[in-house]
Image (spheres, rainbow, N blue to C red):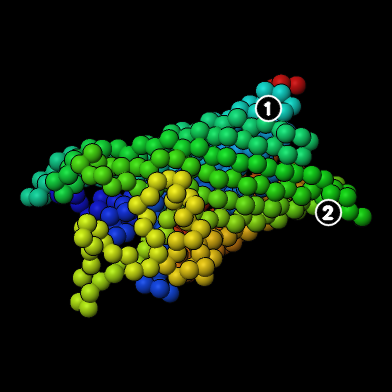
Amino acid sequence: MINRTFAFIILCIAITSFAQAQKPNYLGQTNTITTAVPFLLIAPDARAGAMGDVGGATTPDASSMHWNPAKYAFIESKAGFAASYSPWLRAIVSDINLAYVAGYYKLDERQTIAASLLYFTLGDITFTDIQGSTIGNYRPNEFSLDGTYSRKFSETWSGAVAARYIHSNLTQGISVGGVATKPGQSIAADVSVYHQRELEWRNVEFAEFAFGVNISNIGSKISYSDATTETDFIPTNLRISPRLTVDLDEYNRLSFTLDINKLLVPTPPIYATDDSGNPLYDNDGNRIIAAGKDPDVNVVQGMIQSWYDAPDGFEEELREFYYAVGAEYWYDKAFAVRSGFFYENKLKGNRQYFTLGAGLKYNVFGLDFSYLVPLEQRNPLENTLRFTLSFDFDDFYN
């Protein structure tokens, strides 16, 4: 038998479509969209984490793979590397964490290649049988391995295509409820564009506007067992982001960025029940849908359907957008102070929090920190310090 800790992790991190179907939702009440491998949506680097989890149009850095790989084409240095670490649920356990490494290399003035690895470990878990005897100690984990090619189309526009391999090993191959399990695997892609141009303002030494769009995690569904035909969507996400940067003077620079996001996966429908609350089925044995659309569709149909399948109509579709806004101040390109705010509707997850952080850059080295302050509910990242160590190898090529 799986212990309570592992059962909790399974419920929170790999919620399946079967679980969605067993919990009817009601109009005007909580109807959260859930997917497999949600670790793909966690902000992996401390710079973005300090700015409310924005990154679609922030100035390019080594961690741009997660936010908008098209930004790499505009990165200034020849090559770079970053390593990030984020504790998870630190108030409860000490061995769950998210690690991220990313690097890039400019082939020429228009072309850049980059790669990254995102690794999420769930810590040590003890498995027991029905009598309570220990079966073994395991360390469930998930990871994604990415690669991208980014190219400038012009002096102000760029685009990128990224490929991603996703591996989710939550059960270590043991049987759950008598059903044999296996690691979930998926292949996905990102398609993104980025635009930046200098603005001409009076009495301002330098001003820049940037805009980015990234559709991430376009890929196959995941299955954790060969004994069932049910599969889960991965978190395909649309990110739209504008940025404004202004140099106040020779030493002071200020940037503001907004990220608007929407998951491009089906919204759970409302299933019909009788007067006693028991589910109703049609002649083929399928549950009858009272409101919304059937979520058992292919990936492309799911992306299209996500714009009009909410049970509560257009009003609920608007609630499915979530937002992040961040500010960044640099002094003499050496010291940064950052802050941000993240908002998600209370009926769609209710994640709301402030973030803050700082950054230092000296020669080829950079160090960033971030801290999160939850507002409406507890957050796995509260009371933890996240950090990113970056290296700019430009000086080695000069």
Badge 2 crowding class, 10 Å Cα cut-off, few under 14, some 14 to 19, many 20 or more, is: some
Q: Which residue is disc 1 drawn over?
A: 111
In the image, 319 versus 143, the foreground residue is: 319
Q: Is residue 47 visible?
A: no
Percent position of residue 228, x then y:
23, 44
Q: Residue at x 28, y 42 (%)?
A: 224
Q: Residue furthest left?
A: 131
Q: Secondary structure at mark 1?
A: strand
Q: Residue at x 23, y 67 (%)?
A: 280
Q: Which residue is disc 2 drawn over?
A: 248
Percent position of residue 301, x then y:
44, 49
Q: Note whether 372 is above or below 63 in the view shown.
A: below
Q: Secondary structure at mark 2?
A: loop
Q: Residue furthest top?
A: 397
Residue 38 lies left or right of residue 189; in this view the side is: left
In the image, 107 versus 289, the foreground residue is: 289
Residue 188's tag is none
| Kind of residue sitting beneath label 1 | Gln
Q: Note whether 3 is above or below 288 in the view shown.
A: above
Residue 219 lies left or right of residue 390; in this view the side is: left
Mark positioned earlier in the residue sequence (1 or 2) = 1
Percent position of residue 108, x then y:
71, 23
In the image, 372 versus 148, the foreground residue is: 148
What's the distance in space between the residues labelled 1 and 2, CA to CA?
Answer: 31 Å
Q: Residue at x 48, y 68 (%)?
A: 313
Q: Is residue 217 visible?
A: yes
Badge 1 crowding class, 10 Å Cα cut-off, few under 14, some 14 to 19, many 20 or more, is: some
Quarter of the image where the C terminus is located:
top right
| Kind of residue sitting beneath label 2 | Leu
